[in-house]
Amino acid sequence: MFVGLQGAGKTTTCTKYAYYHQKKGYKPALVCADTFRAGAFDQLKQNATKSKIPYYGSYTGSDPVKIAVEGVDRFKKENCDLIIVDTSGRHKQQASLFEEMRQISEATKPDLVIFVMDSSIGQTAFEQARAFKQTVSVGAVIITKMDGHAKGGGTLSAVTATKSPVIFIGTGEHMDEFEVFDAKPFVSRLLGNGDMSGFVNKLQEVVPKDQQPELLEMLSHGKFTLRIMYDQFQNMLNMGPLKEVFSMLPGMRAEMMPEGHEKESQAKIKRYMTMMDSMTNEELDSSNPKVFNESRIMRIARGSGRIVTEVMEMLEEYKRLTTMWGKVKGLKNLEKGNMSALSRNKNSQQLNKVLPAQMLKQIGGMSGLQSLMKQMGSGKDLMGMFGGRDE
Ligand SMILES: Nc1nc2c(ncn2[C@@H]2O[C@H](COP(=O)(O)OP(=O)(O)OP(=O)(O)O)[C@@H](O)[C@H]2O)c(=O)[nH]1
């Protein structure tokens, strides 16, 4: 059973969740007990039809409890092994809707109640999540819209308030933009370091296989040259998902790939590449930005037909990337999904510095934060129970 605030992305998430499990070999079914929002049933129906998932529901004004019970009974008879009930979105002030949610839960007796929350909800997350938990026994959290600018800090409050792990994140409007929650990149993003492990995975997708071992070897030593930057720009221009790759890097989305300006960004990258075409091998293979003295910069500008400030801008970009790749250096030891006690402790100390005081208080101070990190790292255990585990 899915519960959450209005517009959190609940209906979308229900269908994504069903689709994810369908791909894993389950036989899911969808029930729309949101008879409050006009269009909710149509939305669910449309997504379900596209992915050939059976559905049941009715339009505004119907009795949501009755619909939920009928849907669950029907799909139990049809031997569906995962029946997902979407309920209408509500705010904690809406007492009648909360009562409706309680009744649906009581009548259908779900194995798991999932609280769906938007990553941008922020400080009110705690109170909202607590209100849900007090009414129905929330057992897991899904965060949506992680593809946006929000870092999802409110998630920590929601996890504390519901005492439940985060199991999935939504990363876009499409059915397959749905990922198993991994605490490591999440915390890293919260701290402003970007999702480095995700970035490396993505690079592995876009970099041709024969270039991968050499590239990863160099990167694991923190050696990032202009030639590597050039090759990567080339790969990205050739192979497409530039936006996705870049969005995982700190600072990149805002400055190099502003939303809706992909064309301009590609032109900029091409411009950078023209300048790099005017560099010597020594310059391209050096990992020391200091080799670029004034006369070299002027020569590159002349050679590429660009102005000096543009060359300097490109070198600044390179410096920023170099710093970032310095962080990748440690990635070799990064075991995906494994939050060791040491890194948990280190991360919670850093988080302690970036979280708003009020949020930290809700979480239970430093010790609360540490146990929360432990809980987040072990979310996969619960997910395994519901067929979400990836292996
Ligand atoms: N970018 C992005 N958009 C999303 C994501 N999940 C949902 N959305 C969008 O968010 C909007 C609201 O989603 P719905 O699924 O209708 O939200 P809801 O919670 O069912 O809405 P209520 O019934 O009002 O509670 C839609 O436009 C979705 O396409 C996501 O992970 N990323």
Image (cartoon, rainbow, N blue to C red):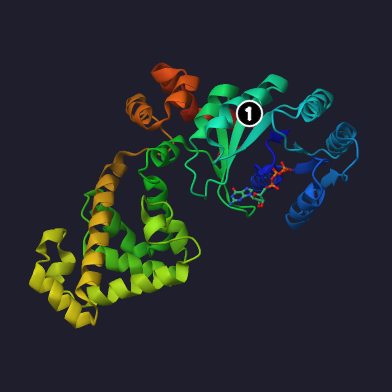
Number of labelled discs? 1
Residue pointed to by mark 1: 128
Q: Secondary structure at mark 1?
A: helix
- Compared to residue 363, the image places residue 299 above or below, namely below
- Amino acid identity at mark 1: Gln
User: In terms of depth relative to the viewer, which is nearer, 364 or 71?
Assistant: 364
- CB of mark 1 near ligand 1 (< 8 Å): no
- Compared to residue 191, the image places residue 302 above or below, namely below
Q: In the image, is 67 to the left or to the right of 81?
A: right
Q: Residue at x 35, y 70 (%)?
A: 269
User: In terms of depth relative to the viewer, which is nearer, 123 or 57?
Assistant: 123
- Residue 321, given in percent of the width and then of the height, sits at 28, 56
User: In terms of depth relative to the viewer, which is nearer, 194 or 343?
Assistant: 194
- Residue 123, given in percent of the width and then of the height, sits at 53, 31
Q: Residue at x 42, y 71 (%)?
A: 264
Res 66 visible: yes
Q: Residues within 10 Å of mark 1 (few under 14, many from 20)?
A: many
